[in-house]
Amino acid sequence: MTAAPLVGWYLHDHGAGHLTRFLAVRPHLDADVVVFSSLARPGTLPARTEWVQLAPDNEPEVSVSGEVRHPSDADPTAGGLLHWAPLGHRGHASRLGVIAAALGSRAFATVVVDVSAEVTLLVRLMGVAPVIVTQPGDRSDRPHALAFDAAERIIAPWPDGRPLAPSLAAVARKVAAVGGISRFDGRASGGAGARTDGGVLPLGGGGAAPVTAGPGSYTH
């Protein structure tokens, strides 16, 4: 009997969308999955799923001399090459060290990164194929370009045939447009009292940016 593949999955901790997307995709994966995240472990996890808690990398730390050091003051972008890699931050070093140790000791088939340019590069440097999740919009900054170049595949959660932004057009052969990913997939529709007039209600997902008010729009 062939052993199930081992898949890593990095979850960014900003907002609730990354976790929601993972939980929607997980039932479709015939694999053992190890999740790496500084998000709190959910109360219940799907079968064959491990959760590895990572240290935060965005909190101030106190040096041995008692000085409070803020990661935003520690050249976190490496002069624009990266998105977030603060110098001398123990939490940042710890989280990447935990991921590297797991990749070095276990036979991962791939790691899905949703999302982090730095983790994408780490995974590739460890000799494991990274599969990254992208979002709509032109992400032509240097860190995104590095991540797109290093990725084995790029998951685009929108319909196939949608024109690609310039930042993705250069790596179009790697892009897999998989359609929208929703936690409501597979659920029955509302029934007799359900709306049928095509109205849309946008809902916030727990991120920091508000939904601004405007004609026909809603706030959260």
Image (cartoon, grey):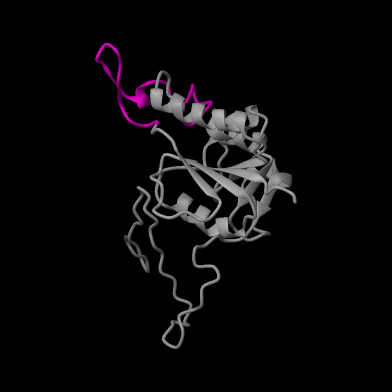
At a point 33% along the width and 30% down the height, the residue shown is: 59
Q: Is residue 27 above or below residue 121?
A: below
Asked if residue 106 lies left or right of residue 116, the reply is right
Residue 184 location (% of width, % of height) = 49, 67
At a point 67% along the width and 37% down the height, the residue shown is: 129
Q: Is residue 8 above or below residue 100?
A: below
Asked if residue 121 can be seen in this view, the reply is: no
Residue 66 location (% of width, % of height) = 24, 15
Residue 220 location (% of width, % of height) = 32, 60
In the foreground, 27 or 216 = 27
- The residue range painted magenta reads 57-84
Residue farthest bottom in this picture = 192
* Picture quadrant of residue 7: top right
Most prominent secondary structure in the magenta stretch? loop
In the foreground, 203 or 142 = 203
Examine the structure image and report whether residue 72 is included in the region drawn in magenta. yes
Q: Is residue 163 above or below residue 90?
A: below
In the foreground, 82 or 43 = 43
Residue 34 location (% of width, % of height) = 55, 43
Examine the structure image and report whether residue 165 is included in the region drawn in magenta. no
Asked if residue 179 lies left or right of residue 194, the reply is right
Q: Total marks drawn?
A: 0
Asked if residue 42 lies left or right of residue 108, the reply is left
Asked if residue 49 can be seen in this view, the reply is: yes
Residue farthest left in this picture = 66
In the foreground, 102 or 12 = 102
Residue farthest top in this picture = 65
